Amino acid sequence: MRAHLAFLVAFAVVFVGVFSARSRQGDDVKVVYNPLYKSRFTKNPIYEPRSEGEAAIPAKSLAKSRWSLASKKVSAAQKISKPAKPQKGPNPFKASLSQFTGLPNICKDIFEVINKNLEVEGLFRISGSAATIDRLKGLYKDGRSHLTEINAELAKNTITVHDLTGLVKLFFRELAEPVTGYNNYKSLINMTNEAEDGLPTAIEVINNLSKQESVTLKNLLELSHNIAQQSKTNLMTPTNLGVVWGPNCIKSKAALSPADMMTDASKVNLAFTSLINWYPELKVSFKN
Ligand SMILES: *[C@@H]1O[C@H](CO)[C@@H](O)[C@H](O)[C@H]1NC(C)=O
Ligand SMILES: *[C@@H]1O[C@H](CO)[C@@H](O)[C@H](O)[C@H]1NC(C)=O
């Protein structure tokens, strides 16, 4: 038994020794192109003389060097393609929501920033700098996400949160069709007349939205709800937010008579205020 064990150990030691000597030797060989291995070096991992008079090259070592070269190439390629450029999208200004897939990048970026700055006073009410908003508009024209850039600018104080709220407000104002859709205007106005709860009408309106309108409005209401929950510090109550968002999001396609315009204006604001207040009940009705 013992003798067997000793023999096995001795054999292992010798084997490892020979093996490592072989690979050391292999490493010392200068690798020259070997025409015998035109295609696949890995297929035949044995020593083979190149031609008469020339030193043998360990095929294994050749294969290894080829392999490591190939894997280096792969990892270099991976490094180049790694920071995948954020996808280009439609120019978000004066756009139609139907051009997008999911929440537009400009909303994604800016909503994320605002959600981290909920304590800032006057969110969406205080206007940013017109020149900065115009510059940021140029940045976002390619439809890509610019979250990295805007976070860097915020850190350097070259832009403020109010410039970003101004920009996203501009996006909603310039949409070809408001985020609540023209066809729901009358229902939203009527919703505010209802002596009883207008919630069922609000749910009907949401069911009437296109998928793109639905996802965009849901995110806007969620953000507004988050802001309103911090109104003690940011001073933006649902009513204040309704004044900001109503005229940008609830619009009539048909020109209104001056009288209707007067009476509708406050209803538009009130309708949006109600949507913010009802967001917790409404959110299950949105298409995701
Ligand atoms: C749904 O849309 C249609 C037109 O597409 C409109 O006539 C109807 O009033 C809308 N319903 C609601 C609840 O807004
Ligand atoms: C809105 O209310 C008016 C008056 O009550 C009614 O005639 C009209 O049908 C309503 N429209 C919608 C879309 O609910």
Image (cartoon, rainbow, N blue to C red):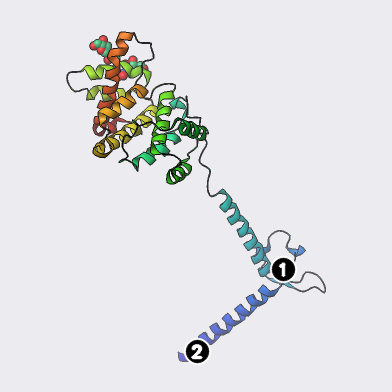
Give the residue type at disc 2. Answer: Ala
Q: In which quadrant is the C terminus drawn?
A: top left
* Image quadrant, ligand 1: top left
Q: For the point 51% across and 38% down, which residue is it? A: 87
Note whether 159 is above or below 282 in the view shown.
Answer: below
Q: Seen in the image, is 63 located left or right of residue 193?
A: right
Can residue 228 be seen from the camera position used here? yes
Q: Seen in the image, is 136 located left or right of residue 198?
A: right
Q: In which quadrant is the N terminus drawn?
A: bottom left
Give the residue type at disc 1. Answer: Val
- Looking at the rendered image, the disc whose residue lies closer to the viewer, 1 or 2, is 1
Note whether 56 is above or below 234 in the view shown.
Answer: below
Image quadrant in which you'd find residue 254: top left
Can residue 206 be seen from the camera position used here? no
User: Which residue is at the front of the view, 168 or 37?
Assistant: 168
Give residue 185's position: percent from left, percent from top: 33, 17
Give residue 116's position: percent from left, percent from top: 35, 43
Note whether 267 is above or below 9 in the view shown.
Answer: above
Image quadrant in which you'd find residue 64: bottom right
* Residue at the disc numbered 2: 6
Q: Residues within 10 Å of mark 2 (few under 14, many from 20)?
A: few
Q: CA distance from mark 1 to mark 2?
A: 40 Å
Q: Seen in the image, is 118 located left or right of residue 158?
A: left
* Residue at the disc numbered 1: 31
Q: For the point 76% across and 71% down, which residue is it? A: 49
User: Which residue is at the front of the view, 163 or 252?
Assistant: 163
